[in-house]
Image (cartoon, helix red, strand yellow):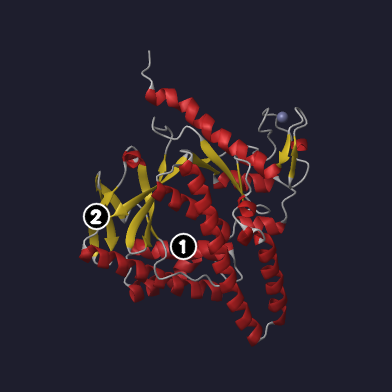
Amino acid sequence: MKQTLLLKLAPDADQHAALLGTLEAFNAACNAVAVVAFREQSASKIDLQKLVYYDIRQRFGLSAQMTIRAIAKVAEAYKRDKRIQPRFRPHGAMTYDERICSFPRVDRVSLLTLDGRVVLPFRYGAYQAARLDRIRGQADLLYRDGTFYLSCTVDAPAPTPDEASDYVGVDLGVMTLAATSDGEFLNHSTGPKHAHVNQVRARYSRFRARLQQKDTKSAKRLLKKRSGRERRFTKDVNHCLSKAIVQTAQGTSRGIALEDLTGIRERISAKRTVSKRQRRVLHSWAFCQLRAFIAYKAALAGVSVVYVNPAYTSQTCSRCGHCEKANRKSQAKFRCVACGFSAHADLNAAENIRRAARSCGQTRRPWTTEPQG
Ligand SMILES: [Zn+2]
């Protein structure tokens, strides 16, 4: 299992300025790389590196590794949607890998900035303390409301005793944005505002298709305006959804279980019923953003997030465990051929995700909490 830890950094004034300057240079560099990626229609890290590496280093004063990270970030973003040139906010997340980020002490992190390395104290809770030794290499530097955070991914093979013993299983999808093991569809239940998310998305996408055919200046201008509006709408929806999920988990002292991305990809490629359009959504920035928002809000709220890879999430019966392709009647419908249990397919999947997270915890718990022999 993988978990996300969010460390709140406590820089002094000079360090704060150094971090901010670095973050801004990094994102400006990303925007410059994006221009080339879009012009050359290239999402290849290696090709982009050949084209821009020296120029970017020189213009933005980044270190070698920062430059490589900026190119990688652009390549990833552009790969998701090749129709548009990716744009990066001035304070967007910056990736730190083990070459430019280290932990010299248990409560200090050392980050490379344009002004050299800074060693920063950070704050963490008891829950995070148990995880700190597992931080490996890569982390994201985030800047939110004037505060710096470092978001780290850790391997968490053995849950600690104070860990959540139950989880809200969440199936993030296309037709329903989020289904939980509590039997809720979050895009329907979080209020009238989000009742029509899919319709709105479809409308935007039809509109886009029409405009793209026209290819005139005014059509392009309109397209840009619309895509900004769509982006803000989706971001707002993602904020509300992630908040609702985290609050539900926190209010009931549970963790959150999500399917890890490898699991989702396997499911998508195994499923013939998934259309090209849906496949695109699962790789889209909107989907990635929702996952990132959940991780970041959960970490702030002290809610643990686990990523499980349950095989055949969509074909397995969450009541009796019977797994067969025939269980899945359609995109929306699940009916177990063994026990007759029937449910919405996404709710069944969410329950399977919850179970996978629980059984992970249970099989390992005796190992860590009970003395052997
Ligand atoms: Zn069954």
How many C-alpha atoms fall within 10 Å of the one at disc 1: few (<14), some, or many (≥20)? many
Which residue lies most toward the bottom here?
A: 217
Position in image of residue 109 (x %, y %): 27, 51
The residue beneath circle 1 is 73
Position in image of residue 97 (x %, y %): 37, 54
Q: Quadrant of ligand 1?
A: top right
SS category of the residue bearing label 1: helix
The residue beneath circle 2 is 120
Q: Residue at x 48, y 38 (%)?
A: 254
52 or 344, which lies in front? 344
In the rendered structure, the answer to whether residue 338 lies left or right of residue 157 reads right
Q: Residue at x 52, y 48 (%)?
A: 245
Amino acid type at mark 1: Lys
Amino acid type at mark 2: Leu
Position in image of residue 257 (x %, y %): 52, 41
Q: Quadrant of the C terminus?
A: top left
In the rendered structure, the answer to whether residue 183 lies left or right of residue 275 reads left
Earlier in the chain: of badge 2 and badge 1, it is: 1
167 or 366, which lies in front? 167
100 or 140, which lies in front? 140
- Disc 2 beta carbon < 8 A from ligand 1? no
Which residue lies most toward the top here?
A: 373
Residue 19 quadrant: bottom left
Location of residue 5 with respect to 321 vertically, above or below = below
